[in-house]
Image (cartoon, helix red, strand yellow):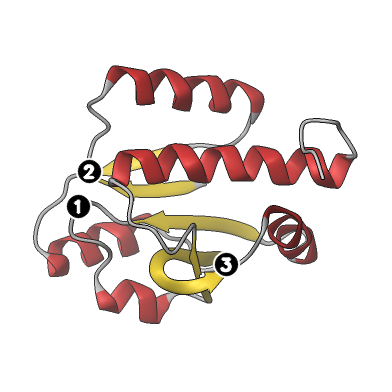
């Protein structure tokens, strides 16, 4: 599951997200309205279950290549993973502290809409790596 702050407005990004969601049945995205960090924290926490494994996507998070990311997700087994992706102002510090892990998509900065699309692509790539499909090239 993915919880994201801020709506996707660009049609080409919406199309990309739609395409990856078709390839990833069972994955859902919940979008919350961006506001001040305390409201965002309350909204996110209200969506999280006790047994969810929270992974925040942050600039300062751990960096992994696609193969390492695939192995990492596989190592989590049957945990209920919830990725938290910030909006234009990033994630509230309280959410980062509440997470089991903080990961970074890149050292570069991306608009939150593009970051959402990149995350979906990397989740799909991870799945194809772990299943031995030819989508990922080494």
Q: Are marks 1 and 3 in contact (CB under 8 Å)?
A: no
* Separation of marks 3 and 2 at Cα, in angstroms: 25 Å
Circle number at residue 88: 1
From the viewer's perspective, tell me whether residue 78 is left or right of residue 111: right
Q: Are marks 2 and 1 in contact (CB under 8 Å)?
A: yes
Viewer-nearest of discs 2 and 1? 1
| Quadrant of the image occupied by residue 30 | top left
Q: Which residue matches tag 3?
A: 51
What crowding class fits label 1: few (fewer than 14 Cα within 10 Å), some (14-19), or many (20 or more)?
A: few
From the viewer's perspective, tell me whether residue 44 is left or right of residue 17: left
Above or below, 17 relative to 107: above
Element class at badge 3: loop
Residue 99 in the image, given as x and y percentages of width and height = 46, 74
Residue 109 in the image, given as x and y percentages of width and height = 33, 56
Above or below, 85 relative to 75: above
Element class at badge 1: loop
Element class at badge 2: loop
């Amino acid at each position: 599951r993915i919880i994201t702050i801020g709506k996707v407005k660009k049609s080409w990004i919406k199309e990309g997200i739609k395409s990856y969601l078709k390839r990833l049945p069972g994955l859902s995205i919940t979008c919350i309205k961006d506001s001040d960090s305390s409201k965002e924290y309350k909204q996110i926490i209200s969506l999280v279950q006790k047994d969810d494994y929270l992974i925040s996507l942050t600039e300062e998070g751990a960096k992994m290549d696609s193969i390492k990311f695939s192995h990492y997700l596989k190592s989590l087994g049957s945990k209920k993973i919830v990725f938290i992706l910030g909006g234009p102002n990033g994630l509230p510090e309280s959410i980062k502290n509440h997470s089991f892990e903080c990961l970074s998509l890149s050292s570069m900065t991306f608009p939150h809409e593009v970051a959402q699309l990149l995350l979906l692509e990397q989740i799909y790539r991870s799945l194809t790596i772990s299943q031995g499909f030819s989508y990922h090239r080494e």
